[in-house]
Amino acid sequence: MNLHVKVGLLDTVDASFQMVQIIIFIGFALVIGGIIFSFVKRAATWSSNKQKPRLRVPVQVVGKRTGSDRRKREACDYPLLCHS
């Protein structure tokens, strides 16, 4: 004979905790899966690039970067807000 009786509120609380555990597990699984997918994709790209021949063609520089004065960046009080 089963003498264990659960109150309705406790059933709801237990179900809520189980749902939270499931959601957290799914979140961790998605994050870990995303990291693994990223590594596999990068490895596949690296392998594909390594199999291709290197291009050796002559080039000509047609422009030079300007406005990259380091002193201007150091003089700014808020470096993230200043443009270089």
Image (cartoon, grey):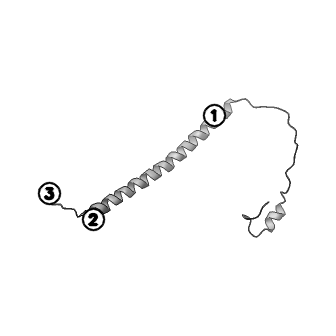
Distance, label 1 to label 3, CA atoms, is 63 Å
Residue at (46, 52) in percent of width and height: 27
Helix, strand or loop for disc 2: helix
Distance, label 2 to label 1, CA atoms, is 57 Å
Which residue position holds label 2?
A: 9
Helix, strand or loop for disc 3: loop
Mark in front: 1 vs 3: 3
Helix, strand or loop for disc 1: helix
Which residue position holds label 1?
A: 47
Residue 12 in the figure: left or right of residue 34 = left
Q: Earlier in the sequence, mark 2 or mark 1?
A: 2
Which residue position holds label 3?
A: 2
Please, what is the three-letter code of the amino acid marked with disc 1? Ser
Please, what is the three-letter code of the amino acid marked with disc 3? Asn
Vertical placement of 17 versus 38: above or below? below
Q: Earlier in the sequence, mark 1 or mark 3?
A: 3
Q: Position of residue 56 (x, y in %)?
A: 80, 31
Residue 41 in the figure: left or right of residue 29 = right
Badge 1: few (under 14), some or many (20 or more) residues near its Cα, within 10 Å?
Answer: few
Vertical placement of 64 versus 4: above or below? above
The answer to whether the residue labelled 1 contacts the one labelled 3, judged by CB atoms less than 8 Å apart, is no
Q: Earlier in the sequence, mark 2 or mark 3?
A: 3
Q: Position of residue 28 (x, y in %)?
A: 47, 52
Residue at (31, 60) in percent of width and height: 14
